[in-house]
């Protein structure tokens, strides 16, 4: 017959097993009269819930521009402890808001467009490759009056 346990009992069992010290999980489960595989399953479910909560939190650099603007509007009138409390609630620091405010206030035309920057870098790489190719071809070309290609040193 399958035994069902209350949430409070499961929480107490998990507190006990995490604070077990040098004892094994099996000894804690025997003390609580619970199958040790059941206890291990509860531990696994608890850790997966915690990891799920941790991965759902958003890093400040993952916030979109619209979310940053909303955060700036929400925190605009706050200062001191109320600002820090709001930041803790959102998982931010006050310096993130300052950085975002500065980014919104700078002229967007001054910042290079990533697509344009990528195009310029690609063009630069292509020109460098072409220059190397032409230098090799020039070095391999014989100089007038010599029968062997120029190696860069005079014999």
Image (cartoon, rainbow, N blue to C red):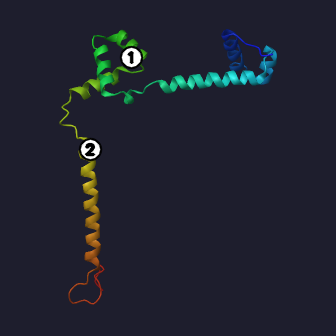
Residue 2 screen position, x and y as percent: 77, 16
- Residue 127 visible in rendering: yes
- Tally of numbered tags: 2
Q: Is residue 21 visible?
A: no
Residue 143's place in the image compared with 83, above or below, is: below
Q: Please give the label number shown on residue 115.
A: 2
Q: Name which residue lies at 26% across and 23% down.
A: 101
Residue 1 relative to residue 57: left or right: right
Query: Residue 3's image quarter?
Result: top right
Tell me if mark 2 has few (under 14), some (14-19) or many (20+) residues whose alpha carbon lies within 10 angstroms of its own: few
Q: Label 2 to label 1, Cα distance in Å?
A: 33 Å
Check the image and report above or below for 108 versus 134. above
Location of the C terminus by quadrant is bottom left
Query: Mark 2 or 1, which is nearer the eye?
Result: 2
Q: Residue furthest front?
A: 1
Q: Residue at (29%, 19%) from the top-left corner?
A: 72
Numbered circle sitting on residue 146:
none
User: Quick one: SS at disc 2?
Assistant: helix
Image quadrant where one finds the N terminus: top right
Q: Quadrant of residue 70?
A: top left
| Residue wearing tag 1 | 87
Residue 50 lies, in percent from the top left, at 57, 22
Give the residue at x 29% y 73%.
Answer: 136
Using residue 114 as the reference point, say whether residue 7 is left or right of it. right
Front residue of 82 and 44: 44
Residue in front for this viewpoint, 21 or 29: 29
Q: Which of marks 1 and 2 precedes in the sequence?
A: 1
Residue 144 vertical placement versus 3 (above, below): below
Residue 123: x %, y % from top left: 25, 55
Question: Dot 1: few (<14), some (14–19), or many (≥20) neighbours within 10 Å?
Answer: some
Residue depicted at 75% across the width and 25% down the height: 37
What is the quadrant of residue 100 in the picture?
top left
């Amino acid at each position: 017959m399958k035994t069902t346990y209350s949430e409070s009992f499961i929480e107490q069992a998990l507190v006990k097993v995490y604070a077990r010290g040098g004892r094994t999980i099996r000894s804690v489960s025997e003390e609580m009269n619970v199958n040790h595989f059941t206890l291990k399953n509860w531990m696994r479910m608890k850790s997966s819930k915690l990891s799920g909560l941790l991965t759902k939190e958003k890093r400040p650099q993952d916030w979109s521009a619209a979310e940053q603007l909303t955060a700036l509007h929400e925190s605009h009138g706050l200062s001191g402890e109320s600002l820090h409390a709001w930041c803790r609630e959102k998982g931010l620091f006050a310096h993130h808001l300052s950085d975002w405010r500065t980014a919104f206030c700078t002229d967007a035309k001054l910042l290079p467009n990533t697509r344009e920057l990528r195009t310029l870098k690609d063009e630069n790489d292509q020109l460098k490759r072409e220059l190397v190719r032409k230098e090799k071809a020039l070095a391999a070309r014989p100089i007038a009056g010599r029968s062997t290609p120029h190696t860069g040193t005079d014999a």
